[in-house]
Image: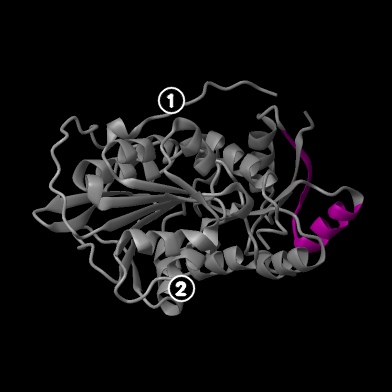
């Protein structure tokens, strides 16, 4: 199998070298070049076209967003943003996703080298996922692998079959690579009286606030970043805050969310598996689960638990996915009731809620 060819674009020599060493440690990745600014990067691309570009936003001569826009309009290549973005700058990250960036890695302003070393597996996974993305559709050193934790570390699997069914439905959604635009399409469909929706989108801390505000500005229902104790109500979608797990809980007939710290689950925080397991436990037959485009298998086991608890489960189909990873894993486990194209998911879901 050919290696994934990566071009690293960053104005910091330390970052370029550290990231190059990190990615090169994966036997399936080859760093073919590094560049200190977009002009140097353009010259490198003319010499050899990479499969993936990692791109900083804050650079001299030309900012990363302008370069990204030029790439996507002239020669689309999967781009992973790798930048030190504060909360104030998170709007730049959202803009990068709108322009076609596949994913975002938020590097700290201090301790960058240590961060990269700790996040080696995650960063390599992001780059490998990016290499599989159809950007037109979207617009060897061995290391010991960290154990891949399950939702057990956050919430125990429910063993009770007892569940009070109500007429009020709750919808839970999980997405990753390509999910920002998929969620926009999905949420734009819903009317003001839609069932309460809870979403986990794999996204860095601080970006989810801007992401929720962007969706709120274009959707009929209210969209907000979830806060601990928020009630799940009709006409509102809650987005899991970056770097925190989100659980669905129930008190009587009231559904609410709990924000929780803890280790990575299925290599993610927030984890779709955590949301889906808590939904299986506290909502059972009252729940509808949706798993969308994304790399990996986060959410597959949780969706199976939802189906076993009596909930209805839907997976996005391969043709409409940017990356058919998470839905495919859920399908292979037998946790999916329906497989639908993206534009059919919300209408089908609404029929289930009538």
In the rendered structure, find residue 214 and report the number of the disc placed on it.
2
In the rendered structure, find residue 170 and report the number of the disc placed on it.
none
Q: Which range is magenta? A: 29-46
Circle 1 packing at 10 Å, graded few (<14), some (14-19), many (20+), is: few
Which residue position is annotated with label 1?
Answer: 147
Image position of 75 (left or right of 118)? right
Looking at the picture, how far across and down is residue 314, in whole percent?
43, 49
Looking at the picture, how far across and down is residue 309, in whole percent?
26, 39
Image position of 193 (left or right of 112)? left
Q: How is the image coloured?
A: one colour
Residue at the image position 39 percent from the left and 45 percent from the top:
272
Question: In the rendered structure, which disc, 2 or 1, sits on the residue that comes first in sequence?
Answer: 1
Q: Please tell me how many numbered marks the rendered image carries.
A: 2
Looking at the picture, how far across and down is residue 276, in whole percent?
33, 44
Q: CA distance from mark 2 to mark 1?
A: 35 Å
Instruction: Specify whether residue 40 is painted magenta.
Output: yes
Q: Residue furthest left?
A: 252
Q: Quadrant of residue 328?
A: top right
């Amino acid at each position: 199998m050919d290696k994934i060819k990566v071009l690293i674009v960053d104005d910091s020599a330390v970052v370029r070298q550290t990231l190059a060493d990190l990615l090169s440690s994966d036997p399936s990745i080859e760093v073919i070049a590094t560049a200190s600014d977009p002009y140097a990067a353009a010259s490198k691309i003319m010499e050899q076209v990479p499969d993936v570009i990692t791109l900083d936003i804050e650079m001299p001569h030309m900012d990363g967003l302008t370069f990204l826009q030029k790439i996507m309009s002239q020669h689309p290549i999967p781009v992973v943003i790798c930048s030190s973005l504060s909360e104030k700058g998170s709007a730049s990250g959202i803009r990068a996703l709108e322009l076609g960036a596949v994913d975002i890695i938020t590097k700290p302003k201090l301790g960058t080298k240590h961060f990269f070393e700790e996040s080696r597996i995650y960063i390599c996974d992001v780059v490998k996922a990016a290499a599989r993305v159809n950007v037109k559709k979207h617009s060897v050193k061995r290391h010991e692998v960290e154990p891949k934790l399950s939702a057990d570390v956050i919430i125990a699997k429910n063993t009770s079959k007892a569940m009070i069914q109500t007429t009020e439905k709750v919808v839970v959604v999980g997405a990753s690579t390509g999910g920002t635009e998929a969620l926009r399409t999905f949420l734009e469909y819903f009317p003001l009286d839609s069932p309460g929706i809870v979403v986990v989108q794999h996204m860095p801390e601080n970006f989810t606030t801007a992401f929720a505000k962007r969706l709120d500005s274009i959707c009929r229902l209210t969209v907000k970043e979830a806060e601990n104790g928020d009630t799940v109500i009709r006409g509102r979608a809650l987005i899991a805050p970056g770097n925190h797990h989100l659980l669905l809980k129930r008190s009587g007939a009231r559904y609410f969310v709990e924000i929780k710290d803890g280790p990575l689950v299925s290599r993610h925080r927030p984890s779709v598996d955590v949301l889906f397991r808590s939904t299986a436990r506290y909502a059972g037959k009252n729940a509808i689960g949706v798993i969308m485009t994304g790399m990996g298998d986060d959410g597959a086991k949780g969706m199976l638990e939802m189906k076993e608890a009596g909930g209805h489960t839907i997976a996005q189909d391969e043709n409409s996915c940017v990356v058919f990873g998470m839905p495919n894993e859920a399908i292979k486990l037998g946790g999916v009731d329906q497989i639908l194209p993206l534009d059919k998911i919300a209408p089908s879901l609404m029929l289930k809620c009538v």
